[in-house]
Image: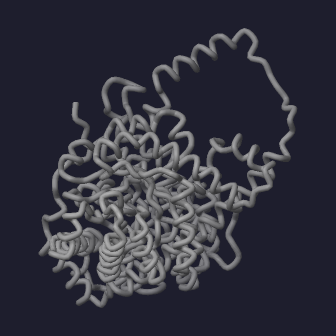
Amino acid sequence: MTTILQQVQRLGQSIWYDNIRRGLIASGELQHLIELGVTGITANPTIFEKAIAGSTDYDSALKTLASSRKSLYEVYEALAVEDIREASDLLRPVYESTGGADGYVSLEVNPSLAHDTEATVAEARRLFTTLDRPNVMVKVPATPEGIPAIRRLIAEGINVNVTLIFSLVVYRQVIEAYISGLEDLARTGGELGRVASVASFFVSRVDTAVDAALEERVRHGDDGLRPLLGKAAIANARLAYREFKRSFAGERFATLRARGARVQRPLWASTGTKNPGYSDVMYLESLIGPDTVNTVPPATLTAFLDHGRAESMLEQGIDEASEVMEALSQSGISMAEVTARLLAEGVRAFADSFQKLLGNVDEKVKRLNQEQHVHPGASLGSYLPVVEQTLTDLEQRAVVARIWQRDHTVWKPTPEEIADRLGWLNVSEVMCEQVPALEAFAREVREARVHHVVLLGMGGSSLGPEVLRQTFGSAQGYPELLVLDSTVPAWVQAVTEAIDLARTLFLVSSKSGTTLETLSLYRYFRALVEERVGKAMAGRHFVAITDPGTPLERLAQEQDFRRTFLHPAAIGGRFRVLSYFGRVPAALVGLDLAALLD
């Protein structure tokens, strides 16, 4: 039976996996993904940081390396190189069967070198030699200093994954560097067919940035811009693909192609949907086309395997893409400024993740060295055979792997009330993508001199925030959180008397959007706020947190709420605190969201 990933391959696109971890390799899961149709892997400092700090996969190796007197960087590199080599060996049959067109694993050059051409070239050269596999790529950022490094590396026959491309202007420079590098290699008699490169064009981050600017304009009354929400990233990518086709169809590259050169395929990166209100496969389905790669994060791959469609959509709407860019320009949004900022932020984020990674390696090595060699033990007694048999049964039935694959048959034969309740599996990953936007919103509220945040909600909408309030309180300089989950008049009155309505933000929190008590509390406080600040400004004091398509979402739009956060519907009430229901109040009182989600 042909899988959907294999169907995508037939349309000309390779699906790579934007994730790596030792357990992924050792457990056989990566081999399973390859059998499904995954044909490559990308890794970056953030992925390795989560893998090493967030699992025990590397503890044994860390204990051994800790006694070797290696530096922290050398310890990290030893771990990363082993993973990359093993993954590339698993993908070697793909590399061989495609004649070197596919089957690659990418490893990032030290992000701190992003603005140093000479150091980047030297580091990439050293990494490529150390990895010692034909199907590896070194990742080099598309900074002004990275562009000349790309040309030199290609000229040396080193496979390069050019990363952090956001703008068409930079993309043209990347293509020029690649073609010039091939020409340099040809002049020295190099074998052009042995060199491969991809240009990683980042997608969803563009929508995150542009949508924030659009939403601000919509909040100030320009409702005509609403149709542009969620359109910029795909439009930007489609225009990049047009540039790709134009550049590699010309006579200049034809000469190189005749000598065996490959095109530098566009690779769509950052394709996990960051806005839970959008389709979780939109950046995959919309960008399927010939001679492309899409590197897909775990949650997006799972979603695509579950309900994705394999259709060649990339070249549809090219004219519309130009119209979207023109409309954004007319609205005052400069894509040049947006993409320049995203590049700077991307370089900084990878550098920060790399430093955090080294810090986590240091912490883990110290902790492992300090652990006692004698541990208290306990016996299961007569229950031991039953427990062992149960564990064997779970392993034989691959229960854990099937749960992560959202296989409803783990619980019952039919998918009803199972398949649409498994969003908790990747809620932390989804919400990690929202941390920058939530922190920006918290800064906005803080700068508005809000003194109190009052959460109006019942049950699962209020219990988590109340635990956070009692456990952590508020960071210095941030508003105080009050949770109102009661309609007892005395308690409502006490909250009313404790706040300054003009300096209070109300979170109207209801998954269904129909909770009677919550909506009653909203109407009560709305009337008080209107009396205090006037009807025109009252909406700025309210934020909705609800599922998509609920009456509360419509109410928030009609009554001009400051913001609406749409909760992924597949996350049930028991896990609600991990989504917007818990993260929005946590952000507003200054809690460390990344630490809470780690």
Above or below, 215 against 139 in this view is below
In which image quadrant can residue 545 be found?
bottom left
In-front residue for pair 57/487: 57
In-front residue for pair 292/285: 292
Residue lying at 44% horizontally and 70% vertically, measured from the top left = 153
In-front residue for pair 513/464: 464
User: In this orientation, does residue 277 appear?
Assistant: yes
Above or below, 141 against 311 in this view is below
558 to the left or right of 576: left
406 to the left or right of 115: left
Residue lying at 17% horizontally and 69% vertically, measured from the top left = 254
Residue 268 place in picture, x, y as percent: 33, 62
In the rendered image, the quadrant that contains the N terminus is top left
Residue lying at 21% horizontally and 43% vertically, measured from the top left = 7
Residue 69 place in picture, x, y as percent: 80, 55
Residue 391 place in picture, x, y as percent: 58, 20
Residue lying at 44% horizontally and 44% vertically, measured from the top left = 572
